[in-house]
Image: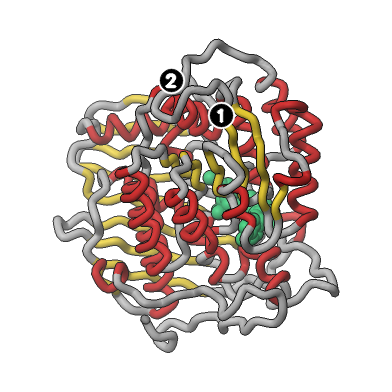
Amino acid sequence: MSYNEKDVVRRPGLGLGRREFLKVAAAGAATAAFPAWGAAGGADRIRVGLIGCGGRGTGAAVQAIRADPGVVITAMGDLFEDRLDSSLSRLKEHFGDRVEVGDDRRFTGFDNHQRVIDSGVDVVLLCAPSHFRPAHLAAAVAAGKHIFCEKPMAVDAPGLRSVIASAEAARMKQLSLVSGFCWRYSSPERATFAKVHEGAIGDVRAVHTTYHAAPIRPPERKPEWSELEWQIRNWWHYNWASGDHIVEQACHSVDKINWAMRGKVPARVTALGGRQARPPERFGNVYDNFSVIYEYETGERCFHTCRQVANTPFDNTDYIIGAKGTCFVNGWAPTHRIEGETPSEYEGDRPNMYQVEHDELFASIRSGKPIDDGELMTLSTMMSIAGRMAAYTGQTLTWEQAMNSKEDLTPEHYEFGDIETAPVPVPGVTPFR
Ligand SMILES: NC(=O)c1ccc[n+]([C@@H]2O[C@H](COP(=O)([O-])OP(=O)(O)OC[C@H]3O[C@@H](n4cnc5c(N)ncnc54)[C@H](O)[C@@H]3O)[C@@H](O)[C@H]2O)c1
């Protein structure tokens, strides 16, 4: 077993570590003039509720505060009191009166999201584990809130269908819906994908995106935790909670295929995958590698490979291969290069994409010009779910089959206690549902 604790990360650079938190908090102290509210209403204050107070949720709250001097965090919700408390105390320590979350606006338990939504907020940040997103999004849209919605949007096709309906309702209600597909808010990626769309590499023939990473470190299990609590606290490693790492983490790279292909829907999905290097203890029932082939009616073939395996090289590069050149994109390296008939390299600004998401969300609320990420966020999530289903079953799935899948990963109940754990899927044996 090639398992090395040192090589295991919680999240490769995407959470908000203490140093990053302090840097962001200091930058957030600057204020700027801001216009009156747009469509959302009359007051200068924008009341924000955070749902899911973990690493990303706390980071999103920092970015919301930084985005607009009128933002005040007025409510917070988490399933667990300890997670809420540690997030709240960090936010209060660094942002003082920008965080007005008294005891009557801190909510825990399975209905925390509804209570945050009902507490009089204008905007919600949906940052709980992926499984809960469809329900949280539906409740936020029903209540007419503007939304920042972390990726992925669902873990199964029934959840995704609910998200499509919510996105449509948000559009009808003129709500801003910004997704956590953060590369869409990254300047170098925006410029580079625009060049590809403008024909810099000719017609796109194939795309290969990668997310080759280390495993995420699971928490230490406490004896008092029930099986359901354990699985939610260690949600990355249970496919019902995360969707598996191709949906939870590598969906960013599947989104790059969607982006390069300008939102074209694949016709068929074939995938290989398995679990070879994960230790049996504490790593739930998820795979550690996937290789997916997306075939298009018009002949293009796109490939996505991802793994979470210790002692293996990290790679997060996208290779977009066109008739007249190749485009290389790696936001972390960073590389944004086009080779071929019209070579070029991105040399512009590189603002923090996580901050840009929130800057644009709050600017859109102020101006009354809603952002609608509904289409891209649902297609990229569904392509990731389809890849997982094809790998788990070993079957080639048509897009219609994948979209109409009835596989619902919701556990049988949400009360803390025992729940059954699905076995690790076996291709050729696990049925497609
Ligand atoms: N865009 C990105 O780059 C990026 C980076 C990291 C995480 N994410 C996404 O953000 C989400 C959260 O990830 P994280 O890394 O912060 O995980 P985390 O485990 O650090 O935080 C999740 C929090 O949600 C809480 N929670 C669990 N069930 C809940 C429920 N029903 N209602 C409310 N809160 C609940 C947990 O107690 C925890 O505090 C995930 O969907 C993840 O995929 C996105």
Residue 298 drawn at (x, y percent): 14, 56
Q: Which quadrant of the structure image shows residue 204?
A: top left
Please tell me whether mark 1 sits on a helix, a strand or a loop: strand
Residue 393 drawn at (x, y percent): 40, 80
Q: How far, Cα to Cα, is label 2 from label 1?
A: 35 Å
| Residue at figure coordinates x 37%, y 81% from the top left | 433
- Chain-order first, disc 2 or disc 1: 1
Residue 336 drawn at (x, y percent): 41, 32
Q: Is residue 428 above or below residue 135?
A: below
Nearest the eye: 207 or 216: 216
Callout 2–callout 1 Cβ contact below 8 Å: no
Lateral position of residue 200 relative to residue 134, left or right: left
- How is this picture coloured? secondary structure
**Mark 2 — residue?**
347
* Residue 151 visible, this angle: yes
| Residue at figure coordinates x 62%, y 73% from the top left | 414
Judge depth for marks 2 and 1 and give the one in front.
Answer: 1
- At label 2, the amino acid type is Glu
Nearest the eye: 151 or 337: 151
Q: Is residue 255 above or below residue 158?
A: above
| Residue at figure coordinates x 68%, y 40% from the top left | 16
Q: Is residue 78 above or below residue 386?
A: above
Q: Which mark is residue 46?
A: 1
Q: Which mark is residue 186?
A: none
Q: Which quadrant of the structure image shows residue 220?
A: bottom right
Nearest the eye: 36 or 24: 36
* Residue 329 visible, this angle: no
| Residue at figure coordinates x 71%, y 74% from the top left | 416
